[in-house]
Amino acid sequence: MLQSTRAIRRAKPVQRVLYVADLISTIVGKTAAWLIIALMTVVVIEVFKRYLFNAPTAWIFDLNNMLYGTVFMLCGAYTLAQNAHVRGDFLYGSFKPRTQATLDLILYVVFFLPGIGALVYAGLHYAQDSWRILEHSNVTADGPPVYPFKTVIPIAGVLVLIQGLAEMLRCVVCLKSGVWPPRLKDVAELDVIEEQLANSEYVDEDTRKAAIARAHAIDETARQRGMGGDLNT
C-alpha cells in the first residue's frame, strides 16, 4: 500500500487518475477475497455436520451462494484493473498498441457501458425492492435474508464502471502515445525493487541506478508484450 501511495503522488494528473481507480479496485478486491476463507470454513463445517453428525443446516446452501456471489461480483473490478479477464488473444495479441486501444475503446463504448449501466440500473431496483419487503430466500423454509446480498449488485456494478472508465482513459492515452500506460501493480512492484536496492550495503550508487533502469526497461517490455504490443513498432 505504501508503494502504491508513493506511485500515485509521483504520477502526472492523468496517470494519477488511473492509479487511483486501480487502487480502489485493488483494495475492494483484496478485501472481498477474504470471504473465500469464510466460504471454505462454512463448507468444511457443514460437511462435518452433515456426514459425521447427520445434522445438516437447511440454510447453508443459501449462505454459500451469497458468499460466492459476493466474492465473484466485488472482485470483478479488481480483475479488470489487473487486466486478467479472459479474452481471445489469438489476433488481438498481434496488433500494435494503437490498434488494440482502438478496438478496446470501441468495445467498451458499444458493449461495456450499456451492459454495466443496465447492471447498475437493474441492480439498484432489485436492491430497493428487496429492502422494502425485507426479502428472505425462498429456496429453503425460513431462509436467510437476501437484501444485503442484493445490495452488492449495484455496488459491484459501480466499481466495475469506475474501473471501466479508467480503462477507456487508458485507451485514449495509448492512442496518443502509442504505448499502454502502466498499471498500479507495475509501479508498486518497481518501487519495492528500488527500496531493496537503496537499503543494500553491497550495491554502489551507479550499479543501483543501472539496476533500477534495467528493471524499468524489462518491466516496460514485458508489459507491452503482455498487452500484445511491440515496442519497436
Image (tube, grey):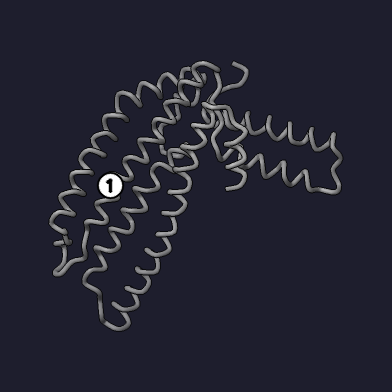
State the image coordinates of residue 228 (x, y, percent, origin top left): 52, 27
Residue under the image location 60 percent in, 36 percent down:
9
Name the secondary structure under disc 1: helix
Closest to the observer: 112 or 43? 112
Lateral position of residue 28 relative to residue 110, left or right:
right
Lateral position of residue 153 relative to residue 182, left or right:
left
Residue furthest out toward the bottom = 53
State the image coordinates of residue 66 (x, y, percent, origin top left): 28, 58
Position of residue 117 relative to residue 99, above or below, is below
Total tally of numbered discs in the picture: 1
- Residue for badge 1: 153
Lateral position of residue 109 relative to residue 99, left or right:
left
Position of residue 230 relative to residue 204, above or below, is above
Residue under the image location 30 percent in, 50 percent down:
152
- Graded by Cα atoms within 10 Å as few (under 14), some (14 to 19) or many (20 or more), the crowding at tag 1 reads many
State the image coordinates of residue 95 (x, y, percent, origin top left): 49, 20
User: Which quarter of the rendered picture does the C terminus lie within?
Assistant: top right
State the image coordinates of residue 144 (x, y, percent, origin top left): 21, 65
Position of residue 210 relative to residue 53, above or below, is above
Lateral position of residue 140 relative to residue 212, left or right:
left
Q: Amino acid at mark 1?
A: Ile
Quarter of image, res 109: top left
Position of residue 76 relative to residue 135, above or below, is above
Closest to the observer: 123 or 91? 123
Residue under the image location 14 percent in, 62 percent down:
138
